[in-house]
Image (cartoon, grey):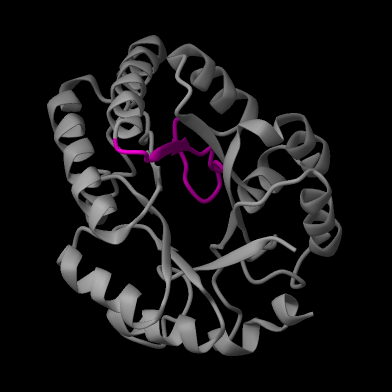
C-alpha cells in the first residue's frame, strides 16, 4: 500500500497551523506536506516535525503574493530575479526541514503575454532551479491543475507538463500527478499513470466532485492504489483533500 502523508493546508483545519503537526501524528500519519513553510521560522517547523517523528515530504517554492491571487511566478519574464531568489530560500527551508521534494507553481497566465514568451521563461527557470536543487539532493516537481478550480493556470494536462519537462531537459525534474486535478481535466487515470510512472515524483489525491476524501465521489481509489502498487511506486501520496466533516472522521478510507 502506498505511503500517505497529510496535507496540513487542507486537513486538520480544526487546529491552528502549528498544532496540525501534532494532530496529524496523533491520527497515525508519519509524513506531512503543505503549500508554504515561509510564513514560519524553519527551526520552529523542524521542531514540530522532530517532536512528532514526522517527515517533511513536500512544500511549494515561493509563488508570489498568494493573497492577491498569484499562483506562482515561474512563467513571468519580469520576475526571474525573484524566482531565483526563491530557489535559494527554498533550499534553506528544505535543508532545515529535511525535505527532498519541492513543487514549482507555474503561475496564472497573463492574457497580454504571448504563450511562447511564458513557456520560454518557465523552461529556463526550471532548468536553473532543477540544476541548483540537484546539487542539494532535492527533487523538483511541476503539476498540472484543473481549469475550474484554478482558471488561467499555465499547465492543465499531464502531457503538457511532460512536454515542458522534456524541453527543460533535466534529470531532476518530475511530474507531480494530482489524481483529482487530472480526473477533471482528462480522466484515463490508470493508463496515464502506468505510461508515466517513471516520471512521476509525487502523487496527490482527493475525490471528485467536491475535493473531499476518497470514497465521497466517482474515483475508484481502491483500484488505483492497487494499480500504483503493482507498478512499483514506493513514494508518497499526499492527501490534499478538504474533509467533508471533521478531519479525523474523514480517515476511514485509509484505515480500510
In which image quadrant can residue 198 be found?
A: top right
Rendered location of residue 139, percent (x, y): 42, 38
Please say whether residue 150 is one of the residues in the magenta stretch: yes
Relative to 250, residue 122 above or below = above
In which image quadrant can residue 52 be found?
A: bottom left
Rendered location of residue 69, percent (x, y): 29, 49
Locate residue 173 relative to residue 107 in the image: left or right.
right
Locate residue 184 relative to residue 160 in the image: left or right.
right
Measuring 14% from the left and 66% from the top, which residue is drawn there? 41
Locate residue 35 relative to residue 201 in the image: left or right.
left
Relative to 82, residue 89 above or below = below
Q: Is residue 218 visible?
A: no
Look at the image and give the residue range highlighted in magenta. 136-154
Q: Quadrant of the N terminus?
A: bottom right
Relative to 256, residue 249 above or below = below
Please say whether residue 147 is one of the residues in the magenta stretch: yes
Q: Quadrant of the C terminus?
A: bottom right
Rendered location of residue 102, percent (x, y): 39, 45
Q: Is residue 132 visible?
A: yes
Locate residue 243 relative to residue 35 in the image: left or right.
right
Q: How many marks?
A: 0
In which image quadrant can residue 239 be found?
A: bottom right
Measuring 18% from the left and 30% from the top, which residue is drawn there? 84
Measuring 23% from the left and 58% from the top, which residue is drawn there? 96
* Chief secondary structure of the magenta portion: loop
In the image, 227 versus 80, the foreground residue is 227
In the image, 94 versus 256, the foreground residue is 94
Relative to 148, residue 162 above or below = above
Rendered location of residue 185, percent (x, y): 67, 40
Measuring 64% from the left and 25% from the top, which residue is drawn there? 159
Amino acid at each position: 500500500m502506498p505511503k500517505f502523508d497529510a496535507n496540513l493546508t487542507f486537513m486538520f483545519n480544526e487546529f491552528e497551523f502549528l498544532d496540525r503537526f501534532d494532530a496529524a501524528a496523533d491520527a497515525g500519519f508519519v509524513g506531512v506536506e503543505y503549500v508554504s513553510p515561509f510564513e514560519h521560522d524553519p527551526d520552529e517547523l523542524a521542531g514540530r516535525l522532530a517532536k512528532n517523528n514526522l517527515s517533511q515530504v513536500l512544500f511549494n517554492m515561493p509563488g508570489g503574493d498568494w493573497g492577491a491571487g498569484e499562483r506562482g511566478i515561474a512563467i513571468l519574464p519580469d520576475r526571474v530575479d525573484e524566482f531565483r531568489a526563491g530557489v535559494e530560500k527554498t533550499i534553506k527551508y528544505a535543508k532545515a526541514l529535511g525535505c527532498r521534494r519541492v513543487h514549482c507553481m507555474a503561475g496564472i497566465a497573463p492574457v497580454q503575454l504571448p504563450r511562447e514568451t511564458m513557456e520560454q521563461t518557465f523552461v529556463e527557470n526550471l532548468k536553473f532551479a532543477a540544476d541548483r536543487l540537484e546539487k542539494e539532493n532535492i527533487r523538483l516537481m511541476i503539476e498540472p491543475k484543473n481549469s475550474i478550480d484554478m482558471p488561467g493556470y499555465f499547465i492543465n494536462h499531464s502531457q503538457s507538463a511532460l512536454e515542458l519537462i522534456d524541453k527543460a531537459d533535466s534529470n531532476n525534474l518530475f511530474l507531480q500527478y494530482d489524481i483529482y486535478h487530472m480526473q477533471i481535466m482528462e480522466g484515463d487515470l490508470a493508463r496515464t499513470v502506468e505510461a508515466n510512472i517513471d516520471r512521476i515524483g509525487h502523487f496527490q489525491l482527493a475525490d471528485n466532485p467536491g475535493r473531499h476524501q476518497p470514497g465521497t465521489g466517482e474515483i475508484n481509489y481502491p483500484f488505483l492504489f492497487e494499480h500504483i502498487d503493482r507498478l512499483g511506486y514506493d513514494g508518497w501520496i499526499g492527501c490534499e483533500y478538504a474533509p467533508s466533516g471533521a478531519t479525523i472522521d474523514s480517515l476511514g478510507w485509509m484505515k480500510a
